[in-house]
Image: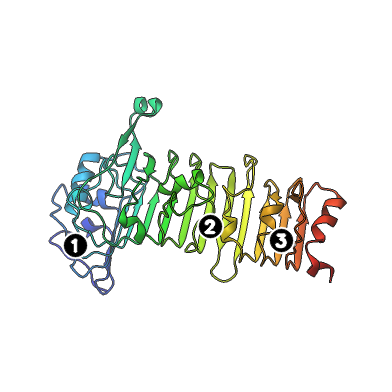
Amino acid sequence: MLGIRPKLPPSCLGVARAHLLLQVTLTNLMSHACACAGSLPVLVPPCTTSRLTLSWKKGRSNTSPDEEDQLLERLRPHSNLHELCIDGHGGSTCPTWLGKNLLTKGLEALCLDSVAWKHLPPLGELYVIGQSVEERESGEEFSSCITGPCFRNLKRLELIGLPRLRRWVANEVCPWYFSLIEVLIVKDCPELTELPFSSYTSCYPLETDSCVTWFPRLNELKIEDCRNLLSLPPIPYSDALCSVTLTRVGRGLEELRYSSKTYHSLSIEGNGDMHSLDETVLAFHNLTQLQILCIKNCPPLAEKHLQMLTMLETLEINGSSNLFLPLARSDTIWQLPVTSLKLWRCNFSGKEVTCLLTHLPELLA
């Protein structure tokens, strides 16, 4: 283990550690900086540092935005940094080395956690709300876009606990750097109403000429506790997606989990506000390999969608008033290879169960 030893008392660095000069973590920064009475020089982590975490204590009541902005500006990393996490910074804006004078263009992973910046890093069209009570009550929003250099290799992006973030908008032309992102995690953004792929909900069925594939390489998507986020793409909206978790988002979803890593499985739970379980929620054309489906407190599937799940082996339904919505007129004969059927707290007739079983011959064999 190798420590960083600038000409400062050790306490001024909080906890600083480097593993073979690959990872550096600086914690409790503001309290130690204050203890050093402003003697903190420009601190540049070693040029071989691959991962850098800059952490302030969360929930502080004695934040000093100007001082914290100055401190973060001085904690300028080298240009070869691969992963960066800024956690709990109490300043009002991102540092210039992460914004208009972007130094870390080759960054592969960026995590912003519990920051309330007016200006965010160059990630496309971003809009934030004001910080004062008057601005919040008016609902006025401000552009947080920073023009200039952008990230060239960003593969993982985490936006966590950003109280001012309102919208992340997709232009008609997809920014090229969106195409590189493989992991997107958004949590605890109470004001968030829009993400770049929200336009998917308005262009179903998908047409090659009219719908852009935002984040074409995205394989992991996690969105939690963003209750004002009403527009989301149908899941899975692309073949590349292999892991999706949506929890407490504002489209009637309590939880949705999708995985195609080992088994193709999907579990979805509504919260009472979901009006329909249709193609605006689930991309059935990308679920033909689905093996396990669990539905809880959701509207029933339409027959036309259920019959598309041609590889389904396990079906569980909990808290539904109907098994599925049959077509008004249909001469189509369809069957599913279901070998396990579980029904709980469901209010439907024996006739409906009999009708469903006619399409599940493996259960009657």
The label nearer to you, 3 versus 1, is 3
Q: CA distance from mark 1 to mark 2?
A: 36 Å
Locate the N terminus by quadrant: bottom left
Callout 3: helix, strand or loop?
A: strand
| Residue 133 to residue 219: above or below | above
Q: Amino acid at mark 1?
A: Ser
Q: Nearer the viewer, residue 153 or 325?
A: 325
Locate the C terminus by quadrant: bottom right
Label located before the other in sequence (1 or 2): 1
Q: Nearer the viewer, residue 134 or 219?
A: 219
Callout 2: helix, strand or loop?
A: loop
Rate crowding at label 1 as few (under 14), some (14 to 19) or many (20 or more) other CA atoms within 10 Å.
some
Q: CA distance from mark 3 to mark 1?
A: 51 Å
Rate crowding at label 3 as few (under 14), some (14 to 19) or many (20 or more) other CA atoms within 10 Å.
some
Callout 1: helix, strand or loop?
A: loop
Q: Point out residue 57 in the picture as x, y percentages from the top left corner.
A: 34, 49
* Residue at figure coordinates x 54%, y 55% from the top left: 235
Residue occupied by mark 2: 236
Label located before the other in sequence (3 or 1): 1
Q: Point out residue 318 in the picture as x, y percentages from the top left corner.
A: 72, 52
Q: Are marks 2 and 3 in contact (CB under 8 Å)?
A: no
Q: Amino acid at mark 3?
A: Leu
Residue occupied by mark 3: 315
Q: Which mark is residue 79?
A: 1
Q: Nearer the viewer, residue 332 or 185?
A: 332
Q: Nearer the viewer, residue 20 or 104?
A: 104
Q: Amino acid at mark 2?
A: Pro
Q: CA distance from mark 2 to mark 3?
A: 18 Å
The label nearer to you, 2 versus 3, is 2
